[in-house]
Image (cartoon, grey):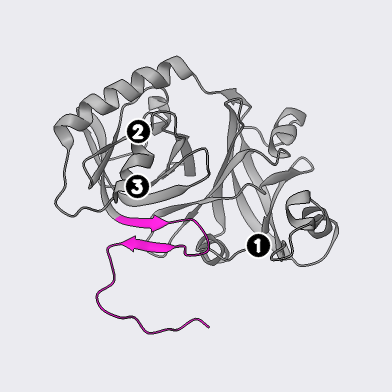
């Protein structure tokens, strides 16, 4: 990891059309991933993002300020890093910059209401996803999924399974490595029934060396329409393919973001007005 944002990395982060993720830690100690296309670099040692809706990551980050991030372009170039929350602001040059972007400047319904500032802890160089290795990993994952299928809880809906089954759909795993939260591309991942996600070690098996059986993990899958689903659970280790036992499923798409599995029992009191 580098301690400064290079010009190449800053240019990648400045793209509005990228996929960008923020990894935080939830109240149960499990990693949590949020899609944040507004993530970008500021100078050589800061990361910012603009908030226009309040998801769970904005609750988790002030309580546990160390986080991970990853950005991926349409050309399959990507980088990742780690950062720590320093402060937020609702005025200033970055606030004006975000709200002057075309997406927000001409939107009558919402704009950026808060800018979050992260101090850089480390950042990788820009890399290219190795598509031949990913294709091979996808085949291995699907073969392993045939023997690891589990459907007792039906945690994933048909839509969720389709997101994970799409070979070209970006997928990302977040876990706590020895040096903190890290995000690893697992495009090769596949569903094994409705209760498990499996993935082969190709192409980034070396980045999973600290992932031990029993560790809490999360995996986000999304498609080209930016529809997404996040699963949280426990890493079950390598028995053929690497497997994750799904315990919770989170709908990360606004305006109705929230946990969709397990389902709440009975009517729930309204507490947020």
Q: Which residue is mark 1?
A: 52
| Magenta run includes residue 131 | no
Q: CA distance from mark 1 to mark 3?
A: 25 Å
Q: Residue at x 83, y 58 (%)?
A: 96
Please identify the quadrant where the N terminus is shown.
Answer: top right
Q: Which residue is mark 2?
A: 189
Q: Secondary structure at mark 2?
A: loop
Compared with 75, 17 (above or below) is below
Q: CA distance from mark 2 to mark 3?
A: 13 Å
Disc 2 to disc 3: CB gap under 8 Å: no
Secondary structure mostly seen in the magenta stretch: loop
The 10 Å Cα crowd at callout 3, few under 14, some 14 to 19, many 20 or more, is many
Query: x, y (%) of residue 92?
Result: 84, 62
| Magenta run includes residue 255 | yes
Query: x, y (%) of residue 48?
Result: 70, 51
Query: x, y (%) of residue 15?
Result: 71, 38
Does residue 210 appear left or right of residue 96 in this picture? left
Q: CA distance from mark 1 to mark 2?
A: 30 Å
């Amino acid at each position: 990891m580098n301690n400064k944002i290079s010009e190449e990395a800053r240019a990648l982060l400045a793209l509005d059309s990228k996929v960008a993720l923020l990894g935080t830690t939830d109240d149960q100690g499990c990693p949590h991933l949020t899609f944040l296309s507004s993530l970008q670099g500021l100078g050589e040692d800061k990361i910012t993002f603009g908030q226009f809706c309040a998801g769970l990551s904005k609750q988790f980050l002030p309580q546990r300020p160390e986080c991970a991030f990853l950005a991926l372009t349409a050309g399959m170039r990507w980088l990742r890093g780690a950062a720590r929350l320093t402060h937020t602001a609702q005025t200033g040059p970055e606030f004006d910059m975000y709200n002057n972007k075309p997406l927000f400047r001409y939107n009558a319904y919402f704009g950026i209401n808060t800018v979050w500032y992260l101090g850089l802890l480390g950042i990788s160089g820009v890399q290219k996803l190795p598509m031949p290795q990913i294709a091979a990993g996808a085949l291995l994952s699907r073969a392993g999924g045939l023997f690891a299928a589990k459907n007792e809880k039906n945690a994933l809906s048909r839509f969720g399974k389709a997101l994970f089954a799409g070979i070209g759909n970006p997928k990302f795993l977040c876990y706590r490595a020895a040096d903190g939260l890290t995000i690893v591309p697992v495009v090769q991942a596949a569903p094994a029934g409705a209760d498990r996600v499996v993935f082969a070690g190709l192409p980034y098996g070396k980045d999973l060396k600290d992932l031990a059986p029993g560790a809490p993990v999360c995996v986000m899958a999304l498609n080209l329409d930016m529809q997404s689903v996040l699963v949280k659970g426990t890493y079950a280790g390598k028995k053929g393919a690497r497997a994750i036992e799904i315990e919770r499923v989170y709908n990360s798409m606004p305006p109705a973001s929230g946990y969709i599995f397990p389902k709440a029992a009975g009517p729930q009191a309204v507490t947020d007005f």
